[in-house]
Image (cartoon, rainbow, N blue to C red):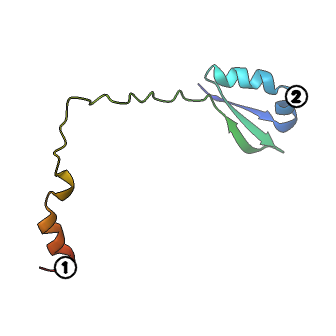
């Protein structure tokens, strides 16, 4: 869909209508003295995060915080 350019005065007087048009998918460019200043676009729906979706699918070993500790120690202390 093409962008619609409106001047700042029109945007102030018709903001409610312009927001409705943007929510419907139209991009509105607000210009001042013919120079584009802002863009009114629809809000993208946030992806819903599903917490716990890997529950029961992965296993973290009890000693996971000590895995490769000798190698890491050697990297930091040159042993």
Query: Residue extending furthest front?
Result: 62
Give percent across and percent down for residue 48.
45, 27
Question: Disc 1 marks which residue?
Answer: 77
Whole-angstrom CA distance, mark 1 to mark 2, is 68 Å
Give percent across and percent down for residue 55.
26, 29
| Residue 7 placement: quadrant | top right
Q: Of the residues under marks 1 and 2, which one precedes in the sequence?
A: 2
Disc 1, SS: helix
- Image vertical order of residue 2 relative to residue 73, above or below: above
- Image vertical order of residue 68 relative to residue 56, above or below: below
Task: Estimate how packed mark 1 is, as few (under 14), some (14 to 19) or many (20 or more) residues with alpha carbons within 10 Å.
Answer: few
Question: Disc 2 marks which residue?
Answer: 13
Left or right side of 47 for 6? right
Task: State which quarter of the image contains the N terminus.
Answer: top right
- Residue depicted at 17% across the width and 38% down the height: 59
Q: From the image, state whether disc 1 or disc 2 is nearer to you.
A: 1
In the image, 43 versus 76, the foreground residue is: 76
- Residue depicted at 46% across the width and 29% down the height: 47
Disc 2, SS: helix
Give percent across and percent down for residue 49.
42, 30
Query: Residue extending furthest bottom?
Result: 78
Task: State which quarter of the image contains the C terminus.
Answer: bottom left
In the image, 31 versus 24, the foreground residue is: 24
């Amino acid at each position: 869909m093409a962008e619609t350019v409106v001047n700042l005065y029109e945007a102030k007087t018709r903001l409610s209508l312009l927001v409705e048009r943007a929510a419907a998918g139209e991009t509105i460019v607000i210009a001042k003295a013919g120079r584009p200043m802002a863009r009114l676009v629809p809000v993208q729906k946030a992806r819903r995060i599903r917490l716990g979706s890997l529950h029961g699918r992965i296993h973290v070993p009890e000693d996971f915080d000590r895995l490769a500790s000798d190698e890491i120690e050697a990297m930091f202390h040159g042993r």
